[in-house]
């Protein structure tokens, strides 16, 4: 009997022992940097000689690892291996498949400090953010394992006289899993293992900005004895192998999380049937956001300023759920802005190897340059009141940036920057704030701070986001408690970490037998 699902607790780093363990893990992982990693296809290591390097964003000349890159040939091999493995994996019992996830979660718990360390070094997450990422990965495995057991029970059918009828959920086939770099363990592991526990076989193309962490999942899955070919790991350029995998006739589904541009392209390519293709590809595409927090005239402004600052600048604003628009009732606008600036000025920035630093660098040069470009646009569209420039040149640092008095239609209020840049927008009243909040093409997360019950209830009905939070910040979704996914151009609202998620990787088969 499997116990009820519970979220894995976060590590308390104020405890000296935990602090020491994390420091030690960082030293150990630093001793393993600059190694070379193979592809993993059909249970075997594969080398191509074409190398992709991964770097530490906080120390941009530090190589994290060298990764053999897949080309079309390796992508073909991976798809063929997955096809072969599917013929047996699909008949492995749901119990056994769930057990693979439970064992992998146990290994992650054992290696938590080490996994945190890889994320601190490869993706610039501070200790707490890295630890939350590992905890979320553990949660996904524990949750989806239990979910598979639940789906395996099928559901009761209306009795038909003279027949014994049964509906079972069966897997789809071979899927391409294409995750982003910003939750390099949690999202990658969640997307991959949800597909696998449902009985599918996977070709995993990790982000080129976080291949080392993707490889950690491969190591863990090897250790739990996942059969050859069920998980194939092929880092490589999205442009070179991405289209090839997405358009391949033997790919049955694509599970993507990333930007709107890439997601829409995948959706379009996947919609065109290829020669030999005998199904409509299923596309799960979770994409970007332009998430807003509304601060109402009746809000606790101190609390709201803290929440907005944390949601805008946590992990350098590089969460799909990050607050990038603060919409403030004009009656509390000046007070809020002053408190927000005061709060955000306290943010420490620097190498996240130092646990005292709240913010690290943005992921890479292109993100850094793109952010500076948006800041220049923002300076013209509003009033720069904090930051607005790069930090220490050792890494891709950008100071927490607040641009006030931004018009709701401005570029900075409409386009996802995915960096520590917050637009503050003035609203005439609560209804106007809701109107502004809904006035982008996205609909991922949102929050409202208000002490007025009627306004909160109105937001519940009108604020059109997949994840809406009342009197709390808009980041920090928990598996099981806050199923996650957005509306409109934010994606297909798959609700990762929720009870509908596994169904995306399954199909129902009805068998009616005359008795
Ligand atoms: P991205 O779109 O640049 O890349 C995502 C993945 O797609 C990567 O693995 C990349 O290598 C791959 N890719 C790129 N081009 C491809 C192509 N032509 N074919 C196939 N694959 C291709 O996004 P990113 O920079 O990794 O992540 C940041 C984005 O992800 C932001 O927009 C953020 O809002 C979004 N995001 C959304 C969610 C969500 O749940 N909605 C969660 C996390 C991140």
Image (cartoon, helix red, strand yellow):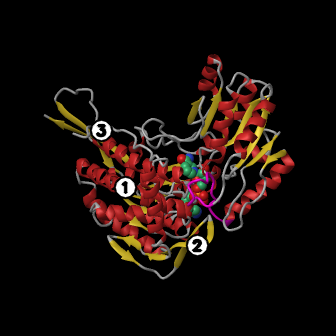
Residue drawn at x 23%, y 51% as measured from the top left: 96
Q: Is residue 281 visible?
A: no
How far is disc 1 from disc 2 in space, using C-alphas? 26 Å
The numbered mark at residue 150 is: 3
Q: Is residue 372 left or right of residue 62?
A: right
Q: Nearer the viewer, residue 296 or 357?
A: 357
* Pointers 1 and 2 in contact (C-beta within 8 Å): no
Indicate the quadrant containing the C terminus: top left, top right, bottom left or bottom right: top left
Q: Which residues are magenta?
A: 351-365
Query: Which mark lies nearer to you, 1 or 3?
Result: 1
Above or below, 411 relative to 512:
below
Indicate the quadrant containing the N terminus: top left, top right, bottom left or bottom right: top left
Q: Of label 3 and label 2, which has the lower sequence position? A: 2
Residue located farthest toward the front when viewing the structure as drawn: 16
Whether residue 355 is in magenta: the answer is yes
Q: Is residue 29 visible?
A: yes
Q: How many residues crowd mark 2 within 10 Å: few (<14), some (14–19), many (20+)? A: some
Say if disc 2 is inside 8 Å of ligand 1: no
| Residue 256 percent across, percent down from the top left | 51, 54
Q: How many residues crowd mark 3 within 10 Å: few (<14), some (14–19), many (20+)? A: few
Which residue is identified by label 1? 108
Q: Is residue 340 left or right of residue 258?
A: right
Dominant SS of magenta comes to: loop
Secondary structure at numbered mark 3? helix
How far is disc 1 from disc 3 in space, using C-alphas? 23 Å
| Residue 468 percent across, percent down from the top left | 58, 33
Q: Nearer the viewer, residue 416 or 87?
A: 416
Q: Nearer the viewer, residue 256 or 276?
A: 256
Q: Quadrant of residue 261?
A: bottom right
The numbered mark at residue 62 is: 2
């Amino acid at each position: 009997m499997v116990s009820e699902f519970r979220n894995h607790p976060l590590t308390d780093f104020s405890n000296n022992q935990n602090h020491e363990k994390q420091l030690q893990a960082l030293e150990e992982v630093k001793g393993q940097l600059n190694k070379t990693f193979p592809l993993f296809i059909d249970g075997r290591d594969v080398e191509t000689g074409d190398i992709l390097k991964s770097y530490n964003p906080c120390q941009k000349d530090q190589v994290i690892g060298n990764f053999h890159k897949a080309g079309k040939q390796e992508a073909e091999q991976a798809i063929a291996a997955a096809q072969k493995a599917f013929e047996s994996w699909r008949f492995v019992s749901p119990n056994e498949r769930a057990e693979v996830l439970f064992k992998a979660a146990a290994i992650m718990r054992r290696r938590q400090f080490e996994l945190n360390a890889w994320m601190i070094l490869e993706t610039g997450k501070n200790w707490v953010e890295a630890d939350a990422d590992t905890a979320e990965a553990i949660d996904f495995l524990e949750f989806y394992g239990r979910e598979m057991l639940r789906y395996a029970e099928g559901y009761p059918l209306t009795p038909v006289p003279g027949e014994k009828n049964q509906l079972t959920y069966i897997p789809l086939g071979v899927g391409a899993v294409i995750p982003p770099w910003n939750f390099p363990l949690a999202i990658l592991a969640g997307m991959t293992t949800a597909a696998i526990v449902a009985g599918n076989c996977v070709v995993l193309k990790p982000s080129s900005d976080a291949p080392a962490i993707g490889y950690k999942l491969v190591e863990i899955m090897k250790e739990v004895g996942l059969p050859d070919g069920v998980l194939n790991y092929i880092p490589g350029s999205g442009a070179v192998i991405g289209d090839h995998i997405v358009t391949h006739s033997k790919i049955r589904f694509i599970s993507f999380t990333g930007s709107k541009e890439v997601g829409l392209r995948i959706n379009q390519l996947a919609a065109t049937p290829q020669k030999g293709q005998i199904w409509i590809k299923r596309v799960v595409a979770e994409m970007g956001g332009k998430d807003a927090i509304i601060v109402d005239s009746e809000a606790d402004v101190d609390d709201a300023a803290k929440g907005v600052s944390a949601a805008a600048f946590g992990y350098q604003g590089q969460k799909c759920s990050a607050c990038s628009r603060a919409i403030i009732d004009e009656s509390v606008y000046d007070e809020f802005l002053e408190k927000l600036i005061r709060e955000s000025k306290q943010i420490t920035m620097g190498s996240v190897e130092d646990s005292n630093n709240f913010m690290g660098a943005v992921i890479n040069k292109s993100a850094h340059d793109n952010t500076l470009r948006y800041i220049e646009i923002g300076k013209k569209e509003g009033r720069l009141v904090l930051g607005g420039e790069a930090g220490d040149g050792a890494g891709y640092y950008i100071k927490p940036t607040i641009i006030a008095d931004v018009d709701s239609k401005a570029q900075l209020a409409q386009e996802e920057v995915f960096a520590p840049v917050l637009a503050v927008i003035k609203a005439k009243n609560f209804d106007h704030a809701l109107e502004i909040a809904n006035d982008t093409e996205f609909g991922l997360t949102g929050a409202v701070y208000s002490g007025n019950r009627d306004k909160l209830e109105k937001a519940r009905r009108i604020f059109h986001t997949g994840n809406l939070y009342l009197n709390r910040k808009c980041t920090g979704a928990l598996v099981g408690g806050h199923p996650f996914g957005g509306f409109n151009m934010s994606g297909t609202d798959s609700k990762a970490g929720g009870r509908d998620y596994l169904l995306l990787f399954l199909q129902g088969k009805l068998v009616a037998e005359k008795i």
